[in-house]
Image (cartoon, rainbow, N blue to C red):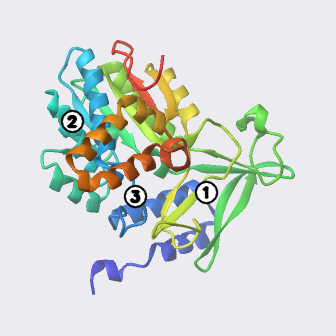
Amino acid sequence: MSDRAAEPLLAERLARAITLGGPIPVAQFMAAANAHYYATRDPLGVKGDFITAPEISQMFGELVGLWLADVWMRADKPQVHYVELGPGRGTLAADARRSMESVGLKPSIHFVETSPVLRQAQAALHPDAVFHDDVTSLPQDAPLLIVANEFFDALPVHQLVRAQDGWHERLVACQDTLFLPIAGKRLPDEIVPDRLRGAVMGSIIETSPASVAITRAISRLVADQGGAALIIDYGYDGPAIGDTLQALKGHDHVNPFEEPGERDLTAHVDFATLGAMAALTGASVHGPVGQGGWLDALGIAARADWLSQTNPERANDVDAARWRLTAPEEMGTLFRVMALRNTDWPEPEGFGG
């Protein structure tokens, strides 16, 4: 029997821990579930649980690469490092590198990735990549060009729920291996923004200290060393009322509290909070703007036309991919783009003004 087969399922281990120690915060449940999930599979593509923009079309990564190359050229072409947080299969980086190299930008490659399965796929495409477990070991000797596409949504969120007597942290309890959310101890009203304290019973507020900490770290690197960062994800301007915790399995929405570690758990990104933290850390903040408008401003229409003309047999697929990436009813509005930059670097394209 393999070591994997001999190990108890994550659900059993979590159930045992909760039975012995009591209910755990939603954030702890989400962190444990996603750590196991990403460590044990490639979740992307038709055979996986979800698909990301780089897997939909090469146009996405190519335009990201051109955006980076443009800001680099207008910064007088310094030596830089390319950094990607959660690079998936390495598809975005491959397309971005091709675009960057077309104008002479050939940065060293750094990936922040903890999944051994995904690291293997990334190394196959990028044998020169340097891997990091977290952002604390990123190089500090040159400006950074940082990309985080659908990275922050997988970071754990704490949930606060409004009860009759005030706000409580939402916890996860269990009966055998049946997990369910419950209200924990009451929290001080002061931790909830004034405008939200009087929300109706059952209202939920989410906060992600992990996302704020990583934003602070990359903003500090950009502010101190130079460079720019792109954060692309689905999200909102918060803090706000709303339960956005969701789970995907086989491209379908499923119960996020069932089968922990066997389905992808995500929550919408609070761009307002991340932007405020970046600004406090010394970076200039641009956006967020809708992904569709951003890609339109970068010239996705012209790129799609060129691909269709040079590959007429793929014209319908190219048009479908562009629509999926930019249409308001698809990824164009819900998915948002925010840029951070060193204050001495030029203002980036795609954000108006």
* Mark 2 neighbour class, 10 Å CA radius: few under 14, some 14 to 19, many 20 or more: many
Residue type of the residue flagged with mark 3:
Ile
11 up-or-down from 181: above or below? below
Q: Is residue 173 in sight in this rendering?
A: yes
Q: CA distance from mark 2 to mark 1?
A: 43 Å
Q: Residue at x 83, y 52 (%)?
A: 201
Q: Position of residue 289 (x, y in %)?
A: 51, 32
Q: Residue at x 52, y 73 (%)?
A: 259
Q: Secondary structure at mark 3?
A: loop
* Mark 3 neighbour class, 10 Å CA radius: few under 14, some 14 to 19, many 20 or more: some
Residue type of the residue flagged with mark 2:
Ser
Marker disc for residue 99? 2
Q: Is residue 137 in sight in this rendering?
A: no
Q: Which residue is mark 1?
A: 25
Q: Nearer the viewer, residue 329 or 86?
A: 329
Q: CA distance from mark 3 to mark 2?
A: 22 Å
Q: CA distance from mark 3 to mark 1?
A: 28 Å
Direction top: furthest residue? 344
Q: Nearer the viewer, residue 193 or 13?
A: 193
95 up-or-down from 45: above or below? above
Q: Which residue is mark 3?
A: 51
Q: Position of residue 11 (x, y in %)?
A: 50, 74
